[in-house]
Image (tube, helix red, strand yellow):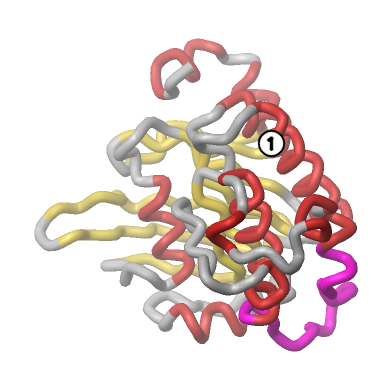
């Protein structure tokens, strides 16, 4: 398979502090790559740089061969990159249907568009709550809505920041099944995650970050065969 996303020599600074130190990785089309590490490892900053929410100080970010480093988030979204932030940022006063409408973008050349009907098939709980406002939803339902709203933009690549954080095990299982189904339908996923158990079930490749430095990059099965890496760098 060809790489859908290539990140080369990414450096990100906040003021004088360098928080991501020249990391590189590639994500194949249709694959799932997990950025793993403890709090402050640089996982969220890496995702935010890919989405254009923080400007890289150096490096290249190429989804589908196009260098987008330094472009504003709105332009990056139009290239086919979707974003699910850690704090979800749904519109609390809008209904589920209205939130989905806010996220709508035209269909792209590849694959079937994510219609409301397809999203409700992916998340049946949202179908039952379609006329409820965002603030009336549970935390798990809000996370489902944040993912569904991002999919409504018909991305080829979906970025998810800590998708399982703070959620009960049954909700995490629902998200795992839904994201697995979305991947089976052609979606490529890049996620930041502290929950190694969740990540190892979903991802086929992993990168471990520590203090903004890449400590491991390779197949998830290799990481599973090297438990000393998980013990040294992850909260397991």
Looking at the image, which residue is at 61% across and 66% down? 133
Q: Is residue 160 a member of the stretch shown in magenta?
A: no
Q: Residue 215: give x, y in percent of width and height.
A: 41, 32
Q: Residue 72: give x, y in percent of width and height.
A: 41, 82
Few, some or many C-alpha atoms within 10 Å of disc 1 (few <14, some 14-19, many ≥20)? some
Residue 217 visible in the snapshot? no
| Disc 1 target residue | 171
Looking at the image, which residue is at 57% across and 78% down? 77
Which secondary structure dominates the residues rendered in magenta?
A: loop
Residue 172 to residue 53: above or below:
above
Residue 83 visible in the snapshot? yes
> Which residue is at the far left?
16
Residue 163 to residue 47: above or below:
above
In the displayed structure, does residue 52 sit left or right of residue 154? Answer: left
Secondary structure at badge 1 equals helix
Q: Residue 193: give x, y in percent of width and height.
A: 52, 38
In the displayed structure, does residue 191 sit left or right of residue 122? Answer: left
Looking at the image, which residue is at 39% across and 58% down? 9
Which of 53/120 is in front?
A: 120
Residue 179 to residue 194: above or below:
below
Q: What stretch is highlighted in magenta?
A: 102-119
Query: Quadrant location of residue 11?
Result: bottom left
Q: Residue 105: give x, y in percent of width and height.
A: 69, 84
Quarter of the image with the N terminus is: bottom right
């Amino acid at each position: 398979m060809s790489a859908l996303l290539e990140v080369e020599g990414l450096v990100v600074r906040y003021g004088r502090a360098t928080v991501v130190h020249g990391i590189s990785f590639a994500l194949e089309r249709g694959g799932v790559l997990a950025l793993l590490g403890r709090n402050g490892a640089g996982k969220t900053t890496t995702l935010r740089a890919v989405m254009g929410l923080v400007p890289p100080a150096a490096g290249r970010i190429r989804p589908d061969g196009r260098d987008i480093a330094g472009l504003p988030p709105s332009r990056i979204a139009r290239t086919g990159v979707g974003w699910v932030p850690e704090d979800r940022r749904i519109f609390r006063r809008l209904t589920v249907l209205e939130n989905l409408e806010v996220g709508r973008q035209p269909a792209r050349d590849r694959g079937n568009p994510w219609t409301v009907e397809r999203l409700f098939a992916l998340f049946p709980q949202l179908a039952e709550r379609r006329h409820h406002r965002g603030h009336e939803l549970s935390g798990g339902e809000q996370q489902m809505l944040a993912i569904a709203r991002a999919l409504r933009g018909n991305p080829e690549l979906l970025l998810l920041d800590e998708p399982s954080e703070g959620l009960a095990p049954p909700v995490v299982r629902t998200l795992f099944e839904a994201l697995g189904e979305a991947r089976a339908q052609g979606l490529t996923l890049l996620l930041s995650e502290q929950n190694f158990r969740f990540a190892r079930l979903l991802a086929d490749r992993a990168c471990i970050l520590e203090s903004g430095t890449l400590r491991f990059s390779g197949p998830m099965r290799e990481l599973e065969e090297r438990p000393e890496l998980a013990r040294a760098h992850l909260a397991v």
